[in-house]
Amino acid sequence: MSDTRVNGTNVLRIEDCENGHIKISLQKGNSLISCQPVPFPYPLTLKILKKLTWYLEEYLSFPYGAERDKARKVEKEMKEWGETLFNQVFQKCDFDPDPYFLYKEAAKKGLDTCELCVVSEDTAFLMIPWELLRDPTPGRYLAPLLRGLYRQRKSKEIGGNPSSSTFRILLVISRPKEKDIPLQTVARPSIGSSTPSEKICRTGGAASSHF
């Protein structure tokens, strides 16, 4: 599986092997380096996902009092979850190249020259919050530093009926932590002259500052 990317961009892939294992590969130009599959236990429990959902979807509706203390605790835990996920993906192994080596190789010229692609046919695997990935050594989330992070099915097929008269767009706008802007000042111009059935998901600056 190869992609045409901007010159100088590396593509680091996390591929679901569908047997409790993942395979990490790195595409640098026309060169593809892969390592053997490694075990990958599901990293986040239902309890963790509920906490994360509360933080991203409910907290900002009332960010006061005890809720603020609860949010600070979740923010601290997010770092731990992200580092656990990182260590489960980019493992240090006794074979060469191992997943961690490929990550370091991809980051050698800066993460801004690297894209992270998650590949699977399993929706649950694709829905893992990969944006939580956090390198524990410098203590940094990968998502805001990468050139791009995206999910992709192995078949590259897009579901849905292309002949349908309704075309839906999900526009996600990250709200700034301070000096917020009026609702729809971004959404309306982006949609332009089209008339889709739109759904706007408001996320808080607190969340975006941690990813």
Image (cartoon, rainbow, N blue to C red):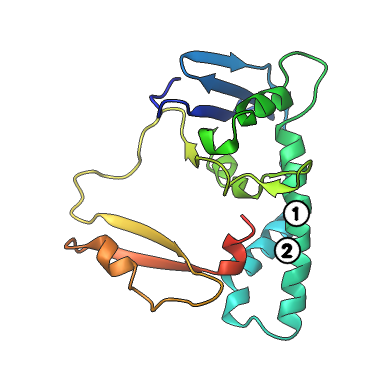
User: Could you give the CA–CA distance between mark 1 and mark 2, rounded to whole angstroms?
Assistant: 7 Å
The residue carrying pointer 2 sits among few (fewer than 14), some (14 to 19) or many (20 or more) residues within 10 Å by Cα, namely some
In the depicted view, which residue is nearer to us: 208 or 58? Answer: 208
137 to 206, vertically: above or below? above
Q: Which residue is farthest bottom?
A: 65
The residue carrying pointer 1 sits among few (fewer than 14), some (14 to 19) or many (20 or more) residues within 10 Å by Cα, namely many
Say if mark 1 contacts mark 2, CB within 8 Å. Answer: yes
Is residue 49 visible in the rendered image? The answer is yes
Residue 194, position as x, y percentages in the image:
18, 61
Question: Residue type at mark 1?
Answer: Lys
Write down the quadrant of residue 71 in the picture. Answer: bottom right
Relative horizontal placement of residue 199, taking residue 57 as reference (left or right) = left
Residue under label 1 = 79
Could you tell me which secondary element the residue under label 1 belongs to? helix
Write down the quadrant of residue 39 in the picture. Answer: top right
Residue 98, position as x, y percentages in the image:
73, 20
Relative horizontal placement of residue 124, taking residue 45 as reference (left or right) = left
The residue that appears at 72% across and 78% down in the rendered structure is 68
121 to 170, vertically: above or below? above
Could you tell me which secondary element the residue under label 2 belongs to? helix
Is residue 116 visible in the rendered image? The answer is no
Question: Residue type at mark 2?
Answer: Glu
Residue under label 2 = 75
115 to 182, vertically: above or below? above
Relative horizontal placement of residue 151, taking residue 156 as reference (left or right) = right
Residue 86, position as x, y percentages in the image:
72, 39
91 to 173, vertically: above or below? above
